[in-house]
Amino acid sequence: MRNSAVSFVAPLVLAASTTVSAQTYKVEEIEAAPPSEVAPEIAATLGAKAYRISAEGGEPLAEIWLRKAIPASAKPAAAKGTVQFPFLAEGELLGVARLVDEAGDYRDQAIHSGVYTMRYGLLPVNGDHLGVSPFRDYALLLPADKDKSVAALPRKKLEDGSMEASGTSHPAIFSMLAAPADAKVSMSHDEEKDAWSVALPLSLTVPGEPEPIRHPVSLIVLGISDAA
């Protein structure tokens, strides 16, 4: 083992890569209470609606509940170097995801069906990750039955918890990218990479702002992304 750095080169996908190109996918907003597996402290922070991702004409793949108000240090602005969301604290709770079926990554590592918290994280800066992705932002998944506090997690606890989700030395992650300010809840397909992204609206609380600010992001949830 060359060093103790955690590897982030295995983004989570909700369907086998061999099936992605043969399918189209949709996202719909549904009325649904957070899963019972979610700790009460975290469930209380989630919105009353979920976003369900499904194959067209098929069964749901995942459901995502977003936090009603995510603390931000400043108004959203342009990327700062390789960080697209410098106003978010590393380890901050973003929401909760329920994987309806087993998911995997491009290395065919299984992520079991179940309920996971989603937290903001950054890819480490070291030689192992040069060329992996132009940006460092990710949403990490942690088992909901073990992640019970709303408070932001320090990096080691964040990464260790996400490695429990994958059962490997690689955290379970969604690549997290900026989306247009006017983006609606939708799925989009990158034909060149054969990857599907879901655009979802984060709700940010910013010091000095009387109301939360809507800020869309894009999560790569199907296929292999640049971060692979």
Image (spheres, rainbow, N blue to C red):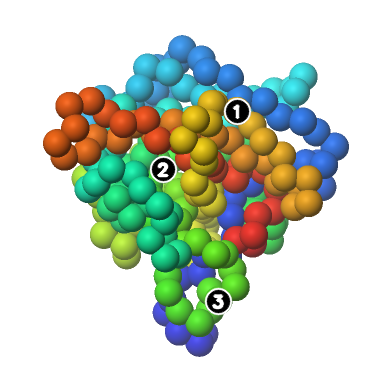
Q: Residue at x 67, y 36 (%)?
A: 188
In the displayed orientation, state which residue is furthest to the bottom. 2
- Residue matched to label 1: 186
Of the residues shown, which amino acid type is indicated by label 3?
Leu
Where residue 93 sits, quadrant-wise, is top left
Q: Is residue 29 left or right of residue 65?
A: right
Location of residue 11 by image quarter: bottom right
Distance of mark 1 from mark 2, alpha carbons? 19 Å
Q: How far across and how far down the image is residue 228, in percent?
A: 64, 62
Quickly name the residue at label 2. 118
Choose the circle earlier in sequence order: 2 or 3.
2
Q: Residue at x 39, y 23 (%)?
A: 34
Q: CA distance from mark 2 to mark 3?
A: 25 Å
Secondary element under disc 3, as helix, strand or loop, is loop
Q: Residues within 10 Å of mark 2 (few under 14, many from 20)?
A: many
Choose between 103 and 94: the one closer to the eye.
94
Q: Spatial distance from mark 1 to mark 3, Cα to Cα?
A: 31 Å
The residue type indicated by label 1 comes to Ser
Q: On the rendered structure, is 64 left or right of 28?
A: left
According to the image, label 3 marks what residue? 130
